Image (cartoon, helix red, strand yellow):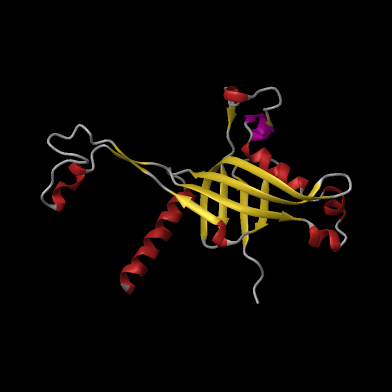
């Protein structure tokens, strides 16, 4: 029997060591959404789009239609029980706090330092001013199964459900929201090729 499915989230950059998290992942717990914004209200003599008669007219029909970047929402469980039972000293002392802090670091603004190293720059900056000049969001890579996509982590919500005697959690339920970086980059390009291949398989089997 194969082991549990693993998910991977890591920082695409020059940080040493890089931020990375490997976690058990249930594909049934992922939500993906994409929206299209329709702005064709000024089309003459129509409601909801431009007039068309043949497929040759479709480029004009689609004027004003904007595709928004895809977003993800996933729920993961961080649990140090197995490592604690195996005598892991880090898990026994800190539970899953290192993994939680890794996710929190991924969503916080970074300042570019010498030699490309990144350091946290959010200690005295908050609210709407979270990202200042010379600060950037972490570019992350989210992988599960055969899919690997570049993303921004847009939200981290945690629910600590079990704690060690020192009150650090050893089990936590995490909700992560991400936005795909749909630009010219190797990860997104490869996923579009994968998507095209899967669509061809579907057409062949129809």
State the quadrant of the C terminus.
Answer: bottom left
Q: Position of residue 38 (x, y in %)?
A: 29, 39
Give the magenta range. Answer: 110-119
Residue beneath the point at 36% across and 69% down: 201
Give 155 or 102, whichever is nearer the viewer: 155
Asked whether residue 165 is drawn in magenta, I would say no
Q: Using the rendered image of the protein, determine whether residue 18 is visible from the camera's viewpoint.
A: no
Residue beneath the point at 62% across and 64% down: 5
Left or right: where does residue 158 sit relative to residue 12?
A: right
Q: Vertical placement of 200 versus 70: above or below?
A: below
Left or right: where does residue 12 sit relative to residue 165?
A: left
Q: Position of residue 112 (x, y in %)?
A: 63, 30
Q: Vertical placement of 138 versus 94: above or below?
A: above
Q: Position of residue 29 (x, y in %)?
A: 56, 57
Q: Position of residue 89 (x, y in %)?
A: 88, 54
Left or right: where does residue 204 sit relative to residue 96?
A: left
Quarter holding residue 116 = top right
Give 129 or 110, whichever is nearer the viewer: 129
Q: Using the rendered image of the protein, determine whether residue 131 is visible from the camera's viewpoint.
A: yes
Residue beneath the point at 12% across and 36% down: 45
Count of all numbered marks drawn on residues in the image: 0
């Amino acid at each position: 029997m194969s082991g549990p499915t693993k998910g991977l989230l890591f920082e695409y950059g020059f940080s040493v060591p890089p931020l990375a998290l490997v976690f058990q992942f249930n594909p049934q717990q992922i939500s993906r959404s994409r929206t299209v914004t329709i702005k064709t209200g000024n089309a003459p003599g129509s409601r909801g789009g431009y007039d068309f008669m043949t497929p040759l007219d479709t480029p004009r029909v689609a004027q004003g239609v904007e595709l928004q970047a895809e977003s993800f929402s996933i729920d993961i469980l961080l649990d140090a029980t197995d490592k604690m039972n195996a005598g892991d000293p880090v898990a026994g002392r800190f539970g899953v706090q290192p993994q939680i802090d890794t996710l929190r670091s991924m969503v916080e603004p970074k300042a570019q330092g010498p030699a490309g190293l990144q350091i946290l720059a959010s200690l005295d900056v908050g609210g709407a001013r979270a990202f200042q000049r010379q600060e950037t969001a972490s570019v992350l890579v989210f992988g599960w199964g055969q899919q690997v996509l570049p993303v921004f982590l847009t939200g981290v919500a945690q629910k600590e459900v079990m704690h060690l005697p020192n009150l650090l959690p050893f089990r936590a339920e995490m909700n992560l929201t991400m936005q795909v970086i749909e630009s010219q980059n190797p990860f997104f390009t490869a996923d579009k090729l994968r998507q095209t291949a899967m669509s061809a398989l579907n057409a062949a089997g129809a």
